[in-house]
Structures are given as structure tokens and as C-alpha cells.
Image: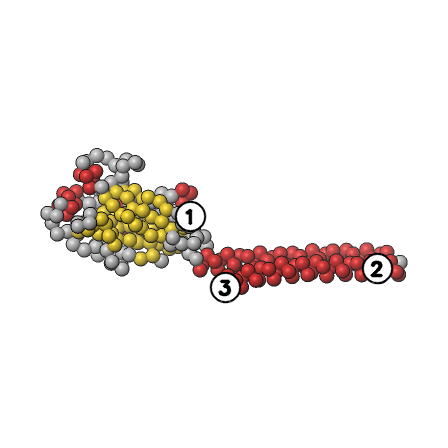
């Protein structure tokens, strides 16, 4: 069923309810006229009571059907228009990293711009994980090597740079700067050698976000950016194992 069909179904339920109420009203009027003509007040009372109960049952059934159609329409819209997260403008502040000054909320060691370009809200919350597992729902890894790592580096709890959004919801069309406060997962001399071109290693920022749509369907986004020494920017790696959205 398309969105247009769902809207037609909702209007159909409304018109059906209105039609039944008109039918009950006409029935009560005719019953009253007949009872007045025959002067049978007790029969008229019973007919009025039964008509009222029938009208209530019909209205309740129509309302239940209307609410069901609304729920179906909402689910179909959410399924056809899921949230979609993307990570852009990844950067590391190398001078700040090698100055050996601690990271602060206002001065992180790096940042990634995350935005929701889908048509529904994305729910980012730690409760997606079992209680005995590390908070891997959203974290970033700084990695140095010739190629992206074979094993997923963000599965280790010490690599977590959590993504925090207001009320755990990233609204449709919303965005958030994702700070990198922890770079302890990478050897700093190795990182500095790669940055200053004293080695052939590449510098990667690899991130993952677990989230859910409004129906509770779990999804995730993974990105991998590699440092380009000519432009001094982090560009998409093109590695499909580390660049995808579900």
C-alpha cells in the first residue's frame, strides 16, 4: 500500500463513520414517528436504546479501523523514509595532539560532522547493547597503517569517542559535531611520523554509529576517512568494508 492509498483509506474510514451516524439518526427518527402513530411508548423506548447501543458499537468499530489505518500509514511512511546518517568534514588537529595538552570539551583533538539526511529521526542510544558489553554504539578510531585494519578496531571499548546528541535523538535534517577527545589508541610517534611524511603509513579516522528509526529497526553507519597530505584533508577511503549505511 502506498502513502496515497493509506490517505484514501483514512478518509474512507472517516466517511464510513459519518455515514453510519446518519443512518442511525434516520433510523431513530423513523422509529419515533412509528411509535407516536401507534402510541406504544415502551416499544419506542426500547428502539431508542437499541439504536443508541448500535450507534456506539458502529462508531467504536469505525474509530478502531481508522486508528489502525493511521498506524499502517505511519509505519509505511517510516519504512519508505528511514533516517540516514553520514559523516563529513573529518579532521584532526595535529598541532593540538602533539602539544601534549589535554583535550577539553571546547578544544578536542579532532571532529567529524554527522548529519541525518533522511526523512525520519535517528535514535542513538547505548541501550542497544547488552549490559555486559562495552559502549560500541557510537565511537571513532584514529588508526595508522598502510591500509585500513583487517579487524574492526572500534569493537574495543578503549577506542570509544561516544557521540552524544540531545535526548539521544538526531532529528531528520539535524546535524552534530562529533568531537574526538581520546587518541590514546594510536602510538603518537607513529602518528607524527606519518603526518610529517617520515613514513609511508596512512592516517585514518574510522567511525561507526548504531541507531534506530522510529519503528525500532536498528541501523548503523560506518565511515573511513584517509588523510591526504597534498590537500591536508581527510577524504573518503573508498573501502566498501568501512564506507556504508544500512
Residue 153 appears at what percent x and percent y? 24, 51
Label 1 and label 2: CA atoms lie apart by 59 Å
User: Which residue is depicted at the point 72% across and 56% down?
Assistant: 53
Q: Mark 2 and mark 3: span between their CA atoms?
A: 47 Å
Give the secondary structure at mark 3. loop
**Crowdedness near tag 1: few (<14), some (14–19) or many (≥20) residues, C-alpha within 10 Å:** some
Any mark on residue 2, and which? Answer: 3
Q: Residues within 10 Å of mark 2 (few under 14, many from 20)?
A: few
Camera-nearest residue between 74 and 39: 74
- Please name the residue shown 50% across and 56% down the image: 74
Q: Are marks 2 and 3 in contact (CB under 8 Å)?
A: no
Q: Secondary structure at mark 1?
A: loop
Quickly name the residue at label 2: 33
User: Label 1 belongs to which residue?
Assistant: 171
Residue shown at 33% from the left, 44% from the top: 177
**Residue 61 image point, x, y percent:** 64, 59
Amino acid at each position: 500500500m502506498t502513502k496515497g492509498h493509506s490517505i484514501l483509506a483514512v478518509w474512507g474510514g472517516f466517511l464510513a463513520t459519518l455515514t453510519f451516524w446518519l443512518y442511525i439518526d434516520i433510523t431513530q427518527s423513523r422509529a419515533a414517528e412509528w411509535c407516536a402513530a401507534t402510541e406504544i411508548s415502551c416499544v419506542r423506548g426500547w428502539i431508542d436504546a437499541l439504536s443508541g447501543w448500535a450507534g456506539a458499537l458502529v462508531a467504536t468499530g469505525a474509530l478502531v479501523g481508522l486508528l489502525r489505518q493511521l498506524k499502517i500509514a505511519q509505519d509505511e511512511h517510516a519504512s519508505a523514509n528511514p533516517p540516514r546518517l553520514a559523516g563529513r568534514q573529518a579532521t584532526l588537529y595535529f598541532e593540538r595532539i602533539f602539544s601534549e595538552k589535554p583535550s577539553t570539551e571546547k578544544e578536542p583533538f579532532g571532529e567529524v560532522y554527522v548529519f541525518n539526511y533522511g526523512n525520519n529521526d535517528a535514535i542513538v542510544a547505548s541501550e542497544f547493547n547488552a549490559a555486559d558489553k562495552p559502549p560500541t554504539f557510537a565511537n571513532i578510531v584514529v588508526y595508522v597503517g598502510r591500509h585500513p585494519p583487517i579487524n574492526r578496531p572500534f569493537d574495543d571499548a578503549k577506542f570509544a569517542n561516544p557521540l552524544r546528541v540531545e535526548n539521544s535523538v538526531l532529528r531528520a535534517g539535524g546535524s552534530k559535531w562529533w568531537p574526538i577527545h581520546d587518541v590514546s589508541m594510536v602510538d603518537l610517534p607513529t602518528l607524527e611520523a606519518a603526518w610529517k611524511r617520515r613514513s609511508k603509513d596512512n592516517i585514518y579516522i574510522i567511525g561507526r554509529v548504531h541507531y534506530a528509526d522510529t519503528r525500532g529497526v536498528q541501523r548503523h553507519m560506518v565511515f573511513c576517512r584517509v588523510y591526504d597530505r597534498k590537500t591536508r584533508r581527510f577524504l573518503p577511503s573508498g573501502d566498501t568494508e568501512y564506507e556504508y549505511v544500512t
